[in-house]
Image (cartoon, grey):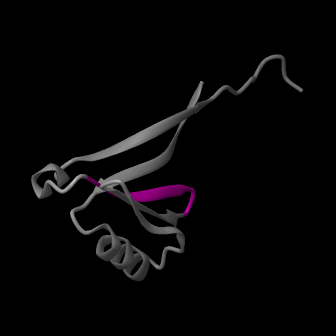
Amino acid sequence: MLLSLDHVIIRSATPAETLAQLAERAGAPILAHVEDVRGMASGIVRAGTVDIEVLRLGDDPGSTRCVSSAVSTRTVSVWPPA
């Protein structure tokens, strides 16, 4: 089994500002501009093969200290040889 990093989530009290800074500093294209739906706001930039999602959950600025990541798995068959 081969593990690969799929995306990283950065929690921010100001996701639109954070997304803009990531896009500008890293030269990363914005895949999804920040949308606010029922107290949750999210936007995504692409950094090579990894998507970086900027996320705000609710209105609690104290809950923005967490950074998490997601790992996807792929099964690679190496036997028998081709």
Q: Give the residue displayed 24% in from the left and 61% down from the top.
A: 12
Q: Give the residue displayed 38% in from the left and 43% down from the top.
A: 69
Q: Is residue 66 left or right of residue 49?
A: left
Q: Is residue 63 left or right of residue 21?
A: left
Examine the rendered structure and indicate whether residue 70 appears above or below residue 27. above
Q: Verify whether residue 50 appears in magenta.
A: yes
How far across and down, in percent of the image, does residue 44 sit?
Answer: 47, 63
Q: Which of the pair 36/42 is nearer the observer? A: 36
Task: Identify the main secondary structure in magenta.
Answer: strand
Quadrant for the C terminus, please: top right
Q: Give the residue displayed 31% in from the left and 67% down from the top.
A: 15
How far across and down, in percent of the image, does residue 8 sit?
Answer: 40, 50
Examine the rendered structure and indicate whether residue 28 appears above or below residue 3. below
Outermost bottom residue: 24
Quadrant for the N terminus, please: top right
Q: Which of the pair 22/48 is nearer the observer? A: 22
Q: Quadrant of residue 35?
A: bottom left
- Number of numbered discs: 0
Q: Which of the pair 33/28 is nearer the observer? A: 33
How far across and down, in percent of the image, does residue 48 sit?
Answer: 55, 63
Q: Which residues are magenta?
A: 48-57
Outermost left residue: 62
Outermost top residue: 80
How far across and down, in percent of the image, does residue 36 sit?
Answer: 38, 63
Q: Which of the pair 17/71 is nearer the observer? A: 17
Q: Is residue 44 left or right of residue 81?
A: left
Q: Give the residue displayed 35% in from the left and 53% down from the top.
A: 38
Q: Quadrant of residue 76?
A: top right
Examine the rendered structure and indicate whether residue 55 appears above or below residue 28. above
Q: Quadrant of residue 37?
A: bottom left
Q: Verify whether residue 61 appears in magenta.
A: no
